[in-house]
Structures are given as C-alpha cells and as structure tokens.
Image: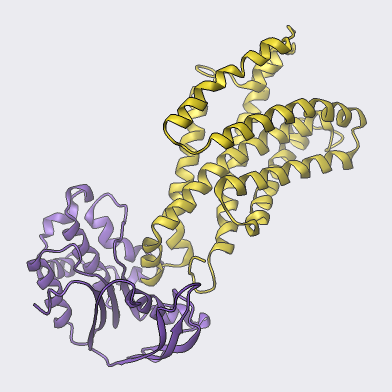
Amino acid sequence: MIDISWFELSISYVFLLIPYILIRKYKIGLTKDLFISIARMTVQLLFVGVYLEVIFRLNYWWLNVLWLIIMFVVTSSTVLSRTKLKKSFFLPIFFSVLISVFLFLGFVVVFVLKLDNFFDAPYIIPIAGMLIGNCLSDLVVSLNTFINNINKQQNTYYFAIANGASQKEALEPFYRSALKIKYNQSLAAMAVIGLVSLPGMMTGQILGGSTPEVAIKYQLLIMLTIFTTTSLSNFLALKFICKKLINDYNCIK
Amino acid sequence: MIEIRDITVRFENKTPLENFSLSIARGEKYILEGVSGKGKSTLLKSILGFVELSQGEIICDGIKLSKENLVEYRSKIAYLPQSLNLDFETLEDLIYYPFSFAINKPLRPSIEQIEEIFSSLKLNISLLKQNLNEISGGEKQRAIFASIMLLKRPIVLLDEPASSLDSVSAMAVWDYIYSQKDTTFICVTHNDIYNK
C-alpha cells in the first residue's frame, strides 16, 4: 500500500480552517470543542497504533477485555459531556452501550466468524470499536433531542400524565422524536452507501489487499450490526435515563 | 372535594407557597387571579403532585396525595397546562389524544358528544378534520379544553384557559365552566375577562 508522508498528512490540517471559520462566523460556540476534538483524535490515533500493536501481540483475553472496558468508559463519558447530562447518568449510558455491543458482537464473533477465542484482539477490538463509535455518535444526537424536547415541552409531558397517561405513554412522543432523528440519520447514510460514500472499513480492506467480495461481505455485516446495535443502545439509553430522570410521582427531576 | 392543608413548597431560592390551606366544595369554581410569580401555577402542580411538598397534605375526592395511590388520585383530576404544544396532524388527533391512554380508552367520546361541546365552546365541528397548522391558537386552545372536559373528571385544573382567546370565545369557555354544576374547577388566570 502507498505510504503517506507526515508532511502531506499535516497539510490536511490546514483545511480545518473551513470548519473553524464557519463555527466562528455563525457563533456556534464550539471553537474550543473543535480544537479539543481534533487534538484528541490526533493524539489518540497516534497512540492507538502503539497500543494495538502491543495488544495484538500479547492477545491476553483479560487485556482485551480491559481495553474494551476503557472504550465503554470513554464513550459513556463523552456522551455525558456532549449531552450535558449529570455524572449520575454515567451507568445508564455505560450499560446501554455495553449490553447492545456485547449482544451483537457475540453474534458476529460466535455465529458468523466462529472464532475459537471470543476475545481475539485482531477481530474483537476493531469490530467493537466500530460498534461503540457509532453508538456514541447516535446517542449524542438522540439523547440531545430527547433532553431538549423534554425540557422545552414539559407541559406536554405533564398534560399527558395528569390526564391519565402512564409514564410510558407520556414519554412516547419524546422517544419517537429522539429515535426518528437517529433513524433519519442512519437510513440516509445506508441509502447512499456504495453509491455516494464508500465506507472506511471496506476501503481499508480493499487497500489492504482483500478482494472486493470479501470486503463487501464484511461491510454488509458491519453495517447491519451497527444499525441494530445503535438501535438497541438508543432504546436502552432512553429507557435507563428515564428511570433516573423521572421520580416516583412521574415528575421530571 | 379538595382539601389543601397547610402546604409549603420550597424551591432552591424561593418559597412560592407557605402554610397555604384551602378547602373547595364539590361544584365550586375557584379562580386565582394575579401577576406571575405568586405561586398560582405552583398550586396547581402541587395538587397534581408535580412539585414536592415540604409540608402539609392534599386530599382530592377523599384520596390523599401519595405515591402509593397516585393513579387513583390523578384519575379524579383533569388538567390543562398553559402554552401547550401538542404536535398532531389534525384537530381530531388532538381531541382523541387523552383517549389513547389505556386508562381513558373506555371513555372515548362519540362524535355527538364532541359536537355538543364544540357547539358550547363556539367551535365549528368541520374543524375536526382540519390540519392543525390551519387552525388558530384560540381554536386549538378551546379544542384541548374540550378534550379534557370529555374525560368527565370531577376536578378540573386550568392554567390560563383563556389566554389565547378573544372576548367572545373566552366568555364561551367561562360560561361552559359555570354550566358544569357538579365539576369542581380551579382556574389560574391573568385574564380578567370573566370579571368584566
């Protein structure tokens, strides 16, 4: 594969001026976040090569599990900070992602790939990474929608509760709008895949020497698994969050 | 019918209700008028159990407000909050919304019942099939009021029921309220149209 020089790579950072100017011009208030996210991404990716090399070489099941747990913790913390939720919501988010990812990761590893070692690092870490990463971006979108709506439309919730709705019935419109945002985004991305966008994993596999057929089969598997995993994690996160958000009197805390 | 005994509601930096007591008999209409921030809406939310009481107790139709009997307690009350934004396609969807809740399904009103209340509130029945975007704020407000009245609860709590209404429509609402002899109302309003 053609290598990229560090100089050429660094030029691509200059293009960040475009999002920077837009964020400043429209006073979006995310300038600091832009720099932090880019810096985090750069540092993390530089280090992840080293980590993964060590982890893949050792391939201890406990080390791989530890790495996965770190991924879940970082994801949950990031969701909290991007949704402005209190720290007490950490565990509901953590478990919603953990349950969803392990369920579908289990399907891929045991049923499809039929690996002898469930925690085989070269498979489980990249696949889990893709699932967790997509859960993160979808959760930020859907939880922000849910929290904004429930804060702005508390009267709608209280109208329903006071006039006979159960908590589940009163929350239904809020779940609907949050999940609709998530599905609109996911379905739009899926609808153009292969035509407009070539997914990173497939491109990477082809560049790495796999045949397009193998790359496509992996990509389809991953796309479907991502879609179902993010669906479940969004649903569970909304349910778990509401357990903490709503008190015994069905009031929003 | 409604017994409010020595209640105090405290928030972080203010106490909107302190040692407040009130007794309202069946069929009475109780109107709370005044400027914002005096605890009127808080009183309605306290009756519904939506704000925590620092002290005191509330009894509605013989049932004490507590988390153990919340469903039964709230089943005695209908509530119309202010500035409600219900997102539905047609007015009919909005009218039937409270009847989509499991507990209210047996009470789903007939078209004749809707016609009757619409007529009292000076609403045209043809509005029922119209898109909500084509309906004025006042018509929507009266339709939501009609919807909760069709629940036929013995106690009705209204927060600014006439805020978006012209004087004729507001009078229709107030006249309807006063025609309901057995229903107990507590209304919060800035609008002194009824007194006029």
Position of residue B112 in the picture relative to residue A221 (left or right): left
Above-or-below relation of A221 to B85: above
Q: Count numbered badges in the picture.
A: 0
Percent position of residue A39, x then y: 67, 30
Query: Which quadrant: the N terminus of chain A?
Result: top right
Residue A91: x and y in percent read 68, 56
Residue A105 lies, in percent from the top left, at: 72, 39
Side of A223 relative to B91 (left or right): right
B161 on left or right of A193: left
Q: In which quarter of the image is residue B158?
A: bottom left
Q: Which chain is yellow?
A: A
Tell me: residue A186, above or below residue A214: below
The chain displayed purple equals B
The correct choice, above or below, for B133 with respect to B144 in the image is above
In terms of image quadrants, where is residue A137?
Answer: top right
Residue at 23 percent across and 89 percent down: it is B28
Q: Quadrant of residue A104?
A: top right
Decide if residue B97 is on the left or right side of residue A140.
Answer: left
Q: Nearer the viewer, residue A230 or A39?
A: A39
User: Which residue is more in the foreground, B42 or B13?
Assistant: B13
Q: Where is residue A27 in the image (x, y as percent from the top left)?
A: 44, 36
Q: In this view, does A66 lie above or below A46?
A: below
Query: Which residue is at a point 79% across and 28% down the rendered structure image?
Result: A47
Q: Can residue B64 be seen in this view?
A: no
Name the residue at 50% across, 74% down. A249
Indicate the colouring scheme. Answer: by chain
| Residue B136 seen by the camera | yes
